[in-house]
Amino acid sequence: MVERRSPKPKVAGSIPVAPAKKRNSLKGDSVKDRMMASSPAQFTQEVKQEFSRVTWPTRKEAVAATMVVLLMSIIAAVFFLFADWVVSSLIRWFLGV
């Protein structure tokens, strides 16, 4: 087996040189700790701030995306209907039913 080396001498290959180091987590660093520390009013305010940052699609974009999803669903349904019919016909022919 050939060992592959990176063209950059200081970069290790896909085999880890050393095990990953565990990060020192400070109290309140995890999402759960932060959620437990905040009040419902603060949480609601943060949710409103996040919603204000969201780029919502226009009505035209939403309708177009919905039509794509419906069209692809119909195409998949027809494909699987045909595939099921072919497989069941082959099984019936093979078994002589």
Image (cartoon, rainbow, N blue to C red):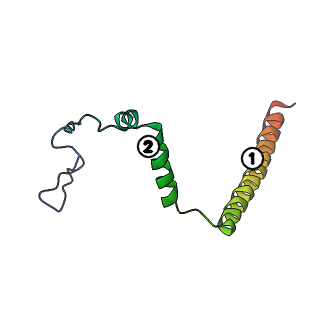
Apparent side of residue 74 relative to residue 29 in the rendered image (left or right): right
Q: Is residue 62 left or right of residue 39?
A: right
Residue at (19%, 37%) from the top-left corner?
19
Q: Residue furthest front?
A: 41
Q: Residue at x 15, y 61 (%)?
A: 8
Farthest residue in the right direction?
97
- Relative depth, front residue between 26 and 41: 41
* Image quarter (top left, top right, bottom left or bottom right) of the C terminus: top right
Residue denoted by label 2: 42
Q: Nearer the viewer, residue 68 or 2?
A: 68
Query: Disc 2 marks which amino acid?
Result: Gln
- Left/right placement of residue 83 relative to residue 34 reads right
Q: Residue 44, position in %: x, y? A: 49, 44
Residue drawn 74% across the image and 47% down it = 80
Determine the secondary structure under disc 2.
helix
Q: Position of residue 40 (x, y in %)?
A: 47, 37
